[in-house]
Image (cartoon, rainbow, N blue to C red):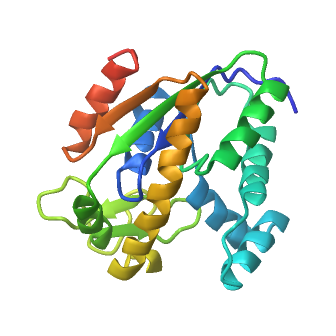
Amino acid sequence: MSASLVRDIIVFIGPPGSGKGTLSGLCVRELGWVQISTGNLCRKHIADNTKIGQEIDFAIKSGKLVSDNLITDMIIDWFKYIDNQVRTVALDGYPRTVAQAQAFNQFLMTHFDSVRLKIVRFYLSDHAIITRLSNRYVCQNKNCQAVYSFIAGTTLQPKQVDRCDSCGGHVGRRKDDESEAIVERLKLYGRHEKELLDFYRKAGQHVYEFHVDRPVQEVFEEFKRGLGLQV
């Protein structure tokens, strides 16, 4: 692995629909960070038919959970090819379990001389999550995957109903954003989140917490102040 200038890794922890992708996207555009979304990365590996993508696709089609080891291998593979000018990385959706967190910490200790890990938790009620996800639409271009919302009054609606503002790709819903699937995802997520937060706190990590049932720009400004970033 080539030398890297990465000095800060920000772990975004929050339930599906809490705006991790939207907020990390703002960090990319306004702060010059680089974002890794495990969901987007999984879909891209599958679309590109990589070895990792084939294994992920096989697990999903077999009705199995994608293993912690496979997800971690995918993240580590990404870091192997990271631009050596990148200084801050936002991890959107990883680590999701204690096993992933332990493996990632070991990787950081082995391959990075000095990196600051910051843990950020976004809180949103289950009712608000279901409303958000039921109205969420995503660009179907695997290289874009911009996220939009059709909730009345939101600033996240695309300019054209079925087209992505960024790349012009088709905008549609994910299968796992149906109501029944959302409820099951939240049950599973809740168990893992508590264990993960306990792990980081016991390790001496401060957890920055933000309530996100507000306009995204308001949350972003509080986020920058809370982390001591330049406003």
- Image spot of residue 163 (x, y percent): 36, 70
Where is residue 198 shown, x and y percent of the image?
52, 37
Q: Which of the pair 97/32 is nearer the observer?
A: 97
Point out the residue furthest to the left here: 153
Is residue 170 visible in the rendered structure shown here? no
Splitting the image into 4 quarters, where does residue 216 fall?
Answer: top left
Q: Residue furthest bottom?
A: 62
Q: Is residue 129 visible?
A: yes
Q: Quadrant of residue 17?
A: bottom left
Quarter of the figure with the N terminus: top right
| Image-based side of 207 in relation to 68, left or right | left
Residue name at image x 21 percent, y 35 percent: 218
Q: From the viewer's perspective, is residue 208 above or below residue 64?
A: above
- x, y (%) of residue 144? 52, 59
Q: Residue furthest right?
A: 1
Q: Quadrant of the C terminus?
A: top left
How many numbered marks appear? 0
Residue at point 39% right, 72% down? Answer: 182
Could you tell me residue 121's position as x and y percent? 41, 38
Residue at the (26%, 36%) spot, across then down: 219
Q: Which residue is rendered at x = 41% and y = 54% of the image? A: 15
